[in-house]
Image (tube, rainbow, N blue to C red):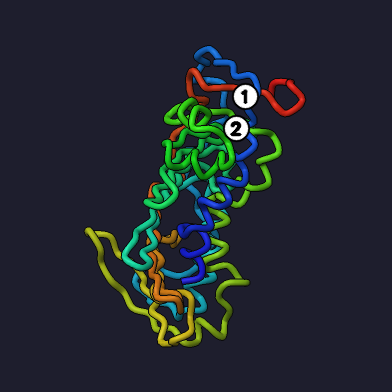
Amino acid sequence: MRAERGIVGGAVAVVLAAGLSACATGGTVTVTPPTSAGTTSAATHTTSTGSASVATGAVPDATTLVHEARSAYRSAKSAHLHATLTSDGVTQTIDIRGTLDGTNQQLTLDDPGQGDATVRTVDGKYYVKGDKTFWKTAAKGHSDATTALLANRWVLAPNDSSADFAKLTIRHVLDDMIGPAAIGDSDTAQMTTSAASQAGVNLFVAISRSATASVDTLKVLAADPHNVVQVTGASTDGSDGTANFDGWNTQAVVTVPQGYLNLSGQDGTTT
């Protein structure tokens, strides 16, 4: 599946590693005192009404369903994503909760090959906590002492990593999965729709009949605003993935972690 592979696959660890490799510069390390938890901008708790027009109970065609799902997530403020990708018997996991645009969020990556890491985004800054395996990849070329220092500690990422992290947001994931560039009307024409119930919640389900489609199954809430519940699919390389979404517009504020490490840059200044 194109979407899950791009977000949940090894590319995630590569993007994170690229953004964080500058952290292990060998420069001066300072520990920032605990900070107040009330200084960040809030992820809204209001409920988005969206602009969906499909009535609950009337099963729309796939084209309408995809368009309504796009409208819903583009109007939403916050959500929770939990996605997995399994390839060659190895399962990678990514979890993101916070604002759709990623300005206030917490992302956790679990990759058996490249380690585990959590990234908090608060007020334009990125705070990272990774295990030793993760830092061996991200700080490649640096000493074991450096990776041991960074392991399981919150670290303020360098300012120039923002471009890498900007792609790791729920909205970007959804755009990659069901945005216009990912799935067109010709693709949805190869999908059938039906009504279903999952854990007592009424859903609309679109299933692809095309062997080449990136998205095999799309599930959205039957009730307005038709938020995405699940996207599944398989790639031509044999990998398959599932992305689950919930907690729409109910995510709590993500705060600055206490006692994070502040690494100096190459020029000796503190970033």
Q: Is residue 121 visible?
A: yes
For label 2, count other residues whose C-alpha is less than 10 Å away and answer few (under 14), some (14-19) or many (20+): many
Q: Is residue 52 visible?
A: no
Which residue is located at x 41 percent, y 52 percent?
A: 113
Please report whichever mark, 2 or 1, sits nearer to the chain's N-terminal start. Answer: 2
Note whether 269 is above or below 239 in the view shown: above
For label 1, count other residues whose C-alpha is less than 10 Å away and answer few (under 14), some (14-19) or many (20+): many
**Residue 76, percent across and down?**
52, 50
> How far is the residue under mark 2 from the one under mark 1?
8 Å
Note whether 181 is above or below 74 in the view shown: below
- Mark 1 = which residue? 263
- Mark 2 = which residue? 24
User: Looking at the image, do the residues carrying marks 2 and 1 touch, with CB atoms under 8 Å apart?
Assistant: yes
**Residue 209, percent across and down?**
40, 87
Please, what is the three-letter code of the amino acid marked with disc 1?
Answer: Leu
Please state if 112 lies on the left or on the right of 7 as rendered: left
Which residue is located at x 61 percent, y 71 percent?
A: 180
Q: Nearer the viewer, residue 86 or 68?
A: 86
| Residue 165: quadrant of the picture | top right
Element type at marker 2?
A: loop
Please state if 201 lies on the left or on the right of 32 as rendered: left
Q: Nearer the viewer, residue 174 or 242?
A: 242
Please, what is the three-letter code of the amino acid marked with disc 2?
Answer: Ala
**Residue 150, percent across and down?**
49, 29
| Residue 160: quadrant of the picture | top right
Which residue is located at x 53 percent, y 12 percent?
A: 33
Please state if 198 lies on the left or on the right of 97 as rendered: left
The quadrant the C terminus occupies is top right
Element type at marker 1?
A: strand
